[in-house]
Image: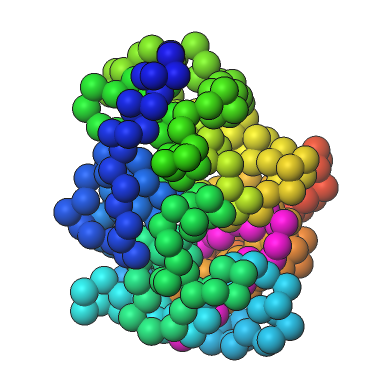
Amino acid sequence: MSGTARRQRTDDAVDGQHGHTDRHDTEAEATMSSATSAADATGTNGAGAPDGQGGEVSAGAGRHMSPADAASARLTGQGLTLAYDQRTIARDLDVRVPDQSFTVVVGPNACGKSTMLRALSRMLKPARGQVLLDGADIAGMQAKALARTLGLLPQTSIAPDGITVSDLVARGRYPHQGLLRQWSRDDERVVNESMAATGVEGLGDRFVDELSGGQRQRVWIAMALAQETPLLLLDEPTTYLDIAHQIEVLDLCARLHEEEGRTLVAVLHDLNHAARYATHLIAMRDGKIVAEGAPAEVVTAELVESVFGMPCRVIDDPETGTPLVVPAARR
């Protein structure tokens, strides 16, 4: 595609500068502007919100972050109360993302994983507390400046009608555009590399709405990669993918972490994938963090049963040596 076409695409992008979710925003507006507004497209649909039932399961719940913990992390949430309208999802929640970690958040359905990720990305405004990025409250940051540091792949994404794969991926470059900085060869290179990394380079001229669910998911991941942020949040990035593509995506995330030093935070449902790939694991239940640390320390049979209600054995993965959860057999 020509540089003129790329510039026109960028000029057409909506520069949404909202600090939190507007449930009437469209995905077109969302994906063109920033990490925070990219997530707006999902709306306040309550995905990942707990059902308000159940009690505390670990001494880790309700703890407060020490100054040392906060100092070791670029991205933190302090004293967060998170709610949708009048429904409170989490109270007094502290979370820290260790710098240059691959942090994975796990927990049962409706425990608040995605809600917490939305707050960390400025997609959901906390009712109380604050989210800090490099010591600054993200609520007061310019959207483009935030989007050059923090990228987000939301749980549910809807592409604008009639957009091609290459056009959608290129919108990840929007935060890097400006009056004095238009589409460049470097932008073109980043888009091409992002598409190649996710295996969608052969789909560039296809319309996004013609693709399978797995293909679309990889296109959205390519767009998030094209944003080139040092911090990347991914809400269920393996959704819609078959097992081979799940491993490809998680291997890609591991390379971004290990080879490029990016800090990643992913919400995953597969506990064994989380244990294999995470360097830092956060386990949640009922809107609380009940345990966190290295997977080998966190993933125990006792914790899995208390958090997920599933009796199991935990053995060493024969390939990686990481914890492998084996559900108890039916009796």
Residue under the point 20% across and 57% down: 23
The residue lying toward the viewer, choosing from 168 and 203, is 168
Q: Residue at x 41, y 57 (%)?
A: 143
Whether residue 331 is in magenta: the answer is: no
Q: Is residue 243 above or below residue 200?
A: below
Tag count in the figure?
Answer: 0
In which image quadrant can residue 135 be found?
Answer: bottom right
Q: What percent of the width, then of the height, locates residue 85?
A: 21, 74
**Horizontal and vertical percent position of residue 53:** 34, 77
Quadrant where the N terminus is found in the figure: top left
The quarter of the displayed image where residue 295 is located: bottom right
In the displayed image of the protein, which residue is found farthest to the left?
A: 24
In this rendering, the answer to whether 57 lies above or below 161 is below
Q: Is residue 221 visible?
A: no
Whole-percent x, y for residue 234 in the image: 51, 49
In the displayed structure image, the side of residue 213 where residue 101 appears, left or right:
right
Q: In the displayed structure, does residue 244 sit left or right of residue 220? A: right
The residue positioned 52% from the left and 16% from the top of the image is 201
- Of 201 and 295, nearer the camera is 201
What stretch of residues is rendered in magenta?
92-110
Magenta: predominant secondary structure element? strand
